[in-house]
Image (cartoon, coloured by chain):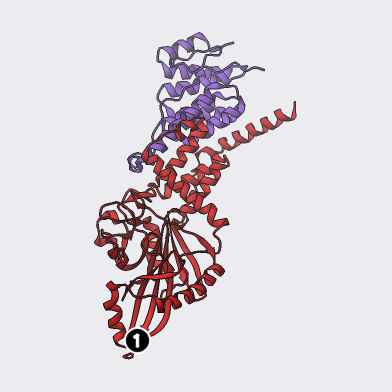
Chain colours: A purple, B red
Amino acid sequence: MIVIIGLSVRTPALADINHSIKSLIETGNYLEAINALNGEIASSPNDKFELYFVRARVYDLSDQPEKAKTAYQSLITRYPGRPEAYNNLARLYSLEGKLDQATALLRAGIYTQVSYRILFDNLTEIYTEQAARALQSALSPSTLDASPVLPISTLREIISPRINQK
Amino acid sequence: MTLRSISKQAVITFLSVLTGLGFLHLNVRASPLDPEKYEQALLTATRLISTGAWENALSTLNALTDEFPQSRVSHLLKADVFAALAGTGEKISKLKSLEIESLRQQIKLRWRNHQEFSDKNQGLVPDKLIKVSAQQSLILYVDLPAARLYIFRNNGQGLVSEADYYVTIGKKGFGKEREGDLKTPVGIYSISGYKPGSTLHERYGHGALTLDYPNPLDQQLERTGYGIWIHGTEPGWINRGPFASDGCITLSNNDFKDLVTRFDLQSGTRVVIDDQPIWKPFKWIEATGDSLVSELSFNHQITASPAKEESVANSVHDEKSVDHGLTEILLYPGSGAELVTQRLLLSDMQRKTTITEYWTRNDDDIWKLTHRME
């Protein structure tokens, strides 16, 4: 069982993804990796959660945040009981400073698996940051005027999903 | 499958449906807030926080900071909520800085006033306002410990509270004696004028009502200083902390605007600034007023005027004035006098004179006239 989560290395550590896709991603050939992943998704008879998840991450790695967001959103709709996509989508929102959305996603994600530590940590991270900002505004409200929506870049990403325990 | 796991699955499905429909992209902010409801919203948020209703508190506070971005107390309450959610609430509540303390004091004072006013003070009147002259249709009353300015309407049958506002007073509190002591005077004053904000330095905010400090009694007691006003708030703030002015009484600009536009304040409107407020039922006020009228009328005949004011008194009496009795009786806050009365004299030339008399009680509990001025 592989339970590698949230390391600072952003290279995917993958379980069932075939070797050639893995090396395409590792060498930065994201377009080819996505094509290969699309092929796998179309043909694989097994559960495709991990393939979808990796594709969402590759969109993110290849600087296509809108596509990544849509991909994570559709993962949440297809697999509402799995927390990984909630977390990573929350992270994308936090990078845009959309903290309310990020918070709501993390809270929803925690409902799916309360033992998933990284979601709690990320939620605490947002709340702590928001507390600090609110305190700053309490002391000098004008500092907030310049940029009302500030990103948080410290949320941790789930790199490899847990193997579904069924 | 247990009942518990069914309900959990139901929650997950429900949430996923919401996220699928783009629920999370909705703007969760509440609709714009009526400026007059500012304090009410602050109190609502405080109550929600005290019951741990973090989400509801946050949405109230978001509405507040959207409408009033400079509301520091709202930002501080928000910080409290986020810290509680993060589980780091203790760090914030232990955070000590003068500025944060002052914001906390403001919240506490508003909260305490709200609590006490809803239960204890309902229908009560400050004991200083024994008999307000019929000429005075409105009277301002500052409850210094509560950091509150009240406006009462004198409707002939009693006093009715029309509005009250959180106020800021001097950095060093109250009991002004000397120029530059940064204290707010305690006593009874009158509005002497109105200055719109456009004619003043920006620190006066929306405008100022000027007061007659030092009044004749202050002058007798050689109190110094000038420019004690009731005014708005400088840019960058909704309200200052409870102790932040140089001696003036300041309101938020919205509250000041409300005060001067909703009420027909006149030059001469009394402003009672009280350091030891006691709130009494109106029946007590009436009974005290009746007994004071008889005590003072009796004492007035036997008490000699102090030498200093003799010339004033004599000049009035030379015209053979007729005493038409006490038109106003106010217990005097602070030191220097215990009671101030207005007495109407009508001369045989039909000249109306109002005499102001200051009284103190001697050791035998007998009222004694100490100062008398025209």
Residue B119 falls left or right of residue B259: right
The answer to which of B307 and A39 lies nearer the viewer is: B307
Q: Is residue B195 visible?
A: no
Question: Residue B166's image quarter?
Answer: bottom left
Image quarter hosting the N terminus of chain A: top right
- Residue farthest to the top? A19
Q: Position of residue A32 (x, y in %)?
A: 44, 17
Determine whether B90 is above or below B177 in the image. above
Judged from the image, the secondary structure of the residue bearing numbered disc 1 is: loop
Residue B199 falls left or right of residue A149: left
The answer to which of B121 and A1 lies nearer the viewer is: B121
Q: Position of residue B267 (x, y in %)?
A: 33, 71
As shown in the figure, which amino acid type bears the numbered disc 1?
Answer: Ser
- Name the residue carrying label 1: B321
Residue at screen point 47% across, 28% down: A125
- Residue farthest to the front? B364
Residue at screen point 28% across, 65% down: B220
Image quarter hosting the C terminus of chain A: top right
Q: How many marks?
A: 1
Q: Residues within 10 Å of mark 1 (few under 14, many from 20)?
A: some
Q: Position of residue B196 (x, y in %)?
A: 29, 63
Determine whether B248 is above or below A25 in the image. below
Q: Is residue A53 visible?
A: yes
Determine whether A24 is above or below B180 in the image. above
Q: Chain of mark 1?
A: B
Determine whether A69 is above or below B51 in the image. above
Q: Position of residue A122 (x, y in %)?
A: 49, 26
The answer to which of A122 and B239 lies nearer the viewer is: B239
